[in-house]
């Protein structure tokens, strides 16, 4: 994609360019034909800007509300929070705070969600191009009166707000980093805000090294559609005393502490797989207690119970067969039940799911799931189906 410039932003925000982008929203964007038409109407440079924005708007449809009215920059779009995560955070984390600073606001994913939730937002962004895009996006959604965009490094500002949200860059030397001191700005710079502001929340990589967090920080994890999206560290009034997991889009939240008691049991009638946020937050035993379930093994995040309770915090299967792993036995089970293994999943098993799936028969009409794990040091297999 062609790099953007201040002139590009001014052009793309103009009514004629916006009209052209609206026309590009439908149908195929065949590169050669579309670019040829745009070059004839607008010239080469502007044609490239228009074509790139049309592609970015399509890419942003699931991530941003009303993406068809907004402007984007490729890297900033990739880094932006998903709209459902940003909206949830604005309501559930920053609910009590009227004035919130979005530090390193980028093109506005979080600032727009905060403003839509009724907050007064101070959006601080040091990149002039991203700040210009954020101004356009705020105006396009009718939120300009609620968002003050400041083009600066927030570390040099006196922040007159009730709370702050920061999403530091997590790339170092061109690679993603999970280390707090390798972020830009480093976590310590953000944490220092807690001495000046009532509440601070910091978006972190889900794979962060938990031991690098200061002891006074709270920590939670957020998933969306089963995919772990972010870790969230809290300071000041947001220094949650226990870890938590939030599962979206349902909005279900599970809080610690983790029970000391370890409940173990062999496979029963049903199997639960906890959501990724629950596992990363270290709340598997907490969830087991909630569901009146037990772990199959102390090292495995599979739960088992005599009954199934539907919950967004875990996926449930009915166990049809189980036993020590043996390929011929598994194949026999599938034939006996007239089933096809439409999914093969594993936890703490050395067996490669993709390789196993290639070898299994697929003739049966019944859709079944193979679950591979270890119980008491032995490779174990379960054949299951989702309850009706």
Image: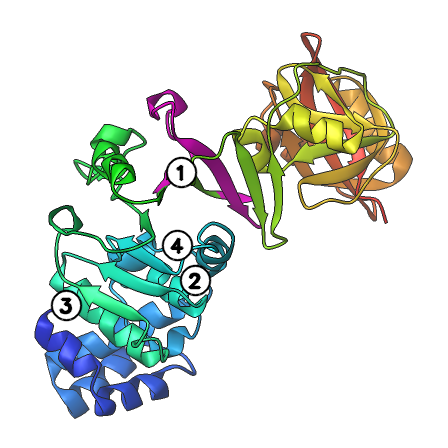
- The residue that disc 2 covers is 63
Determine which of the numbered discs, if any, sits on residue 81 in the image. Answer: 4
**22 or 129, nearer to the observer:** 129
1 or 3: tag closer to the N-terminus: 3
Identity of the residue drawn at 67% across and 27% down? 286
Foreground tag (4 vs 3): 4
Cα gap from disc 2 to disc 4, whole angstroms = 7 Å
> Mark 1, mark 4: which one is toward the viewer?
1
Mark 2 or 4 closer to N-term? 2
Mark 3 surroundings: few (<14), some (14-19) or many (≥20) residues within 10 A: some
Q: Distance between the residues labelled 1 and 2?
A: 24 Å
Q: Is residue 149 above or below residue 314?
A: below
- What percent of the width, then of the height, locates residue 213? 35, 26
Asked which colour scheme the image uses, the reply is: rainbow
Magenta region: 203-228
Q: Earlier in the sequence, mark 2 or mark 3?
A: 3
Q: Looking at this view, is 206 or 333 the one in front?
A: 206
Q: Identify residue for label 1.
A: 234
Mark 4 vs 3, N-terminal side: 3
Q: Position of residue 13 (x, y in %)?
A: 22, 82
Residue under the point 29% across and 79% down: 139
Residue 71 on image: x %, y %: 28, 73
């Amino acid at each position: 994609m062609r790099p953007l410039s201040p002139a590009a932003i001014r052009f793309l925000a103009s009514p004629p360019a916006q009209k052209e982008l609206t026309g590009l929203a439908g149908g195929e964007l065949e590169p050669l034909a579309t670019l040829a038409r745009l070059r004839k109407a607008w010239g080469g440079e502007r044609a490239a800007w228009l074509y790139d924005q049309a592609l970015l708007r399509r890419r942003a449809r699931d991530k941003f509300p009303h993406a068809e009215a907004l402007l984007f920059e490729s890297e900033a779009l990739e880094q932006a929070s998903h709209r459902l995560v940003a909206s949830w955070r604005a309501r559930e984390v920053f609910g009590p705070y009227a004035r919130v600073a979005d530090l390193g606001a980028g093109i506005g994913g979080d600032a727009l969600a905060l403003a839509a939730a009724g907050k007064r937002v101070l959006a601080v962004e040091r990149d002039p191009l991203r700040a210009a895009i954020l101004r356009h996006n705020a105006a396009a959604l009718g939120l300009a009166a609620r968002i003050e965009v400041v083009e600066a490094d927030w570390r040099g500002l006196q922040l007159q707000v009730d709370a702050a949200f920061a999403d530091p860059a997590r790339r170092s030397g061109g690679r993603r980093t999970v280390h707090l001191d390798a972020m830009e700005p480093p976590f310590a710079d953000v944490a220092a805000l807690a001495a000046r502001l009532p509440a601070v929340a910091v978006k972190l990589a889900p794979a962060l090294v938990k031991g690098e967090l200061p002891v006074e920080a709270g920590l939670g994890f957020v998933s969306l559609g089963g995919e772990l999206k972010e870790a969230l560290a809290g300071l000041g009034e947001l220094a949650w005393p226990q870890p938590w997991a939030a599962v979206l889009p349902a909005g279900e939240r599970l809080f610690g502490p983790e029970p000391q008691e370890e409940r173990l049991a062999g496979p029963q009638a049903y199997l639960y797989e906890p959501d990724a946020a629950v596992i990363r937050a270290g709340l598997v035993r907490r969830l087991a207690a909630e569901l009146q379930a037990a772990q199959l093994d102390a090292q495995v995040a599979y739960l088992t119970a005599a009954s199934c309770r539907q919950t967004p915090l875990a996926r449930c299967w009915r166990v049809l067969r189980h036993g020590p792993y043996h390929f011929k036995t598994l194949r026999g089970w599938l034939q006996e039940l007239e089933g096809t293994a439409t999914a093969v999943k594993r936890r703490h098993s050395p067996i490669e799911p993709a390789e196993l799936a290639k070898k299994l028969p697929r003739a049966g009409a019944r859709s079944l799931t193979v679950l591979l794990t270890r119980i008491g040091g032995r490779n174990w297999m379960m054949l299951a189906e989702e309850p009706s």
